[in-house]
Image: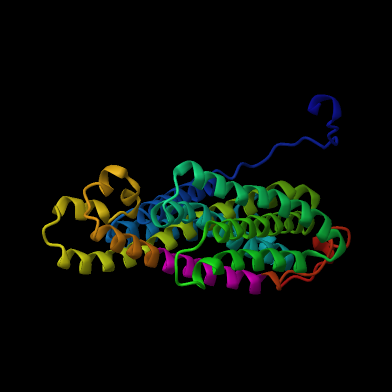
């Protein structure tokens, strides 16, 4: 069908100046930053010197990348794209929405299995509500942006993401399964709405020959947002969990020290073999500690989503048909 139906425009072929310097510095900086973020999300002491050093080196290479791009004849990421207000706002909202959905995908299963006590299969079915909501949100946004514009649809999507996180933060007790499904659905629909809206807005804001690089840059920022949110929420959760373990360990000195070391990573609490080594008196207290640690993680996510709601109102309220191209867009 692609071979038969896809009709490409004829364009003038010419030699291009490959931005090898920009590509290498960007690749190196992102590898360092993503590795440091992934490492900090799973270490017992996430804010250690090694992770901080990797992050600092990655950020330093990003500064080098900026100056390389300013001098490049054909930069891999044209910096003047960020002079366009609609494109810049789309990047911010896209990044924050990715933080929301991937933070939920990462820590909602831990809540369902570690706190509620669901099996992995049942947890997967709950997360399926998020995926289905994502599809539904995309369909809603596809119609909505043509009628009411980018701003209202993006703000509605980010608001749903915030509501999904608020479900975990407002009630102090363990949530019912129905509430978690509601949260997952809201997060999925919100992501679908924000995802499609920011992508179409970014593509509509640039010249036609820049659509490819504009799209890939949005995807890059989404990936960064996802990695950052998982790392940040993981750091908050681990910090709170370790505080709780200090008190529990002082009151349970007879427990195997190796087991305490294992419990420093909450994921290990999901293993039946690990749970079998914990007394019936201590296990509920560990689960309560995990619940409290995840509460702080979801609170962090909620604060990020509220920032996203505010950022969504910075989007110009154009529709795809009325979005002016860069030559007519006021630059800041």
Place residue 90 in its image quadrant.
Answer: bottom right
Does any portion of residue 236 appear in the rendered image? no
- Rendering coords of residue 279 (x, y %): 21, 55
Front residue of this view, candidates 132 and 272? 272
Does 86 sit left or right of 169 as displayed? right
Front residue of this view, candidates 122 and 69? 122
Q: Quadrant of the C terminus?
A: bottom right
Q: Residue furthest left?
A: 254
- Rendering coords of residue 185 (x, y %): 63, 56
Q: Quadrant of the N terminus?
A: top right
Residue 304 belongs to magenta span: yes
| Residue stretch rendered in magenta on the structure | 294-311
| Dominant SS type (magenta) | helix
Front residue of this view, candidates 84 and 317? 317
Does 9 sit left or right of 184 as displayed? right
* Point 31% across, 44% down: residue: 272
């Amino acid at each position: 069908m692609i071979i038969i139906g896809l009709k490409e425009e004829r364009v003038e072929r010419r030699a291009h100046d490959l931005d090898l310097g920009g590509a290498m510095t960007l690749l190196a900086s992102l590898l360092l930053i993503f590795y440091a973020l992934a490492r900090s999300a799973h270490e017992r002491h996430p804010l250690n010197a090694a992770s901080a050093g990797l992050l600092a080196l990655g950020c330093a290479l990003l500064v080098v990348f900026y100056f390389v791009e300013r001098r490049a004849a054909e930069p891999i990421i044209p910096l003047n794209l960020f002079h366009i207000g609609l494109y810049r706002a789309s990047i911010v909202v896209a990044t924050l929405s990715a933080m929301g959905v991937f933070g939920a995908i990462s820590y909602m299963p831990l809540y369902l299995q570690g706190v509620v006590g669901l099996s992995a299969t049942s947890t997967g079915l709950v997360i399926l509500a998020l995926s289905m909501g994502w599809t539904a949100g995309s369909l809603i946004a596809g119609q909505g942006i043509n009628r009411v514009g980018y701003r209202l649809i993006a703000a509605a999507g980010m608001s749903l993401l915030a509501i999904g996180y608020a479900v975990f933060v407002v009630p102090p007790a363990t949530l019912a399964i129905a509430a978690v499904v509601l949260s997952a659905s809201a997060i999925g629909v919100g992501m679908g709405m924000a995802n499609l809206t920011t992508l179409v807005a970014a593509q509509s804001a640039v010249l036609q020959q820049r659509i490819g690089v504009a799209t890939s840059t949005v995807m890059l920022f989404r990936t960064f947002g996802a990695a950052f949110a998982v790392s940040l929420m993981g750091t908050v959760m681990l910090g709170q969990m370790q505080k709780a373990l200090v008190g529990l360990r002082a009151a349970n000195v007879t427990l195997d020290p190796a087991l305490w070391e294992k419990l420093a990573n909450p994921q290990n609490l999901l293993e039946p073999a690990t749970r079998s080594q914990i007394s019936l008196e201590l296990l509920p207290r560990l689960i309560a500690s995990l619940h409290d640690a995840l509460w702080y993680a979801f609170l962090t996510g909620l604060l990020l989503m509220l920032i996203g709601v505010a950022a969504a109102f910075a989007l110009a309220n154009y529709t795809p048909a009325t979005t002016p191209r860069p030559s007519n867009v006021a630059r800041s």
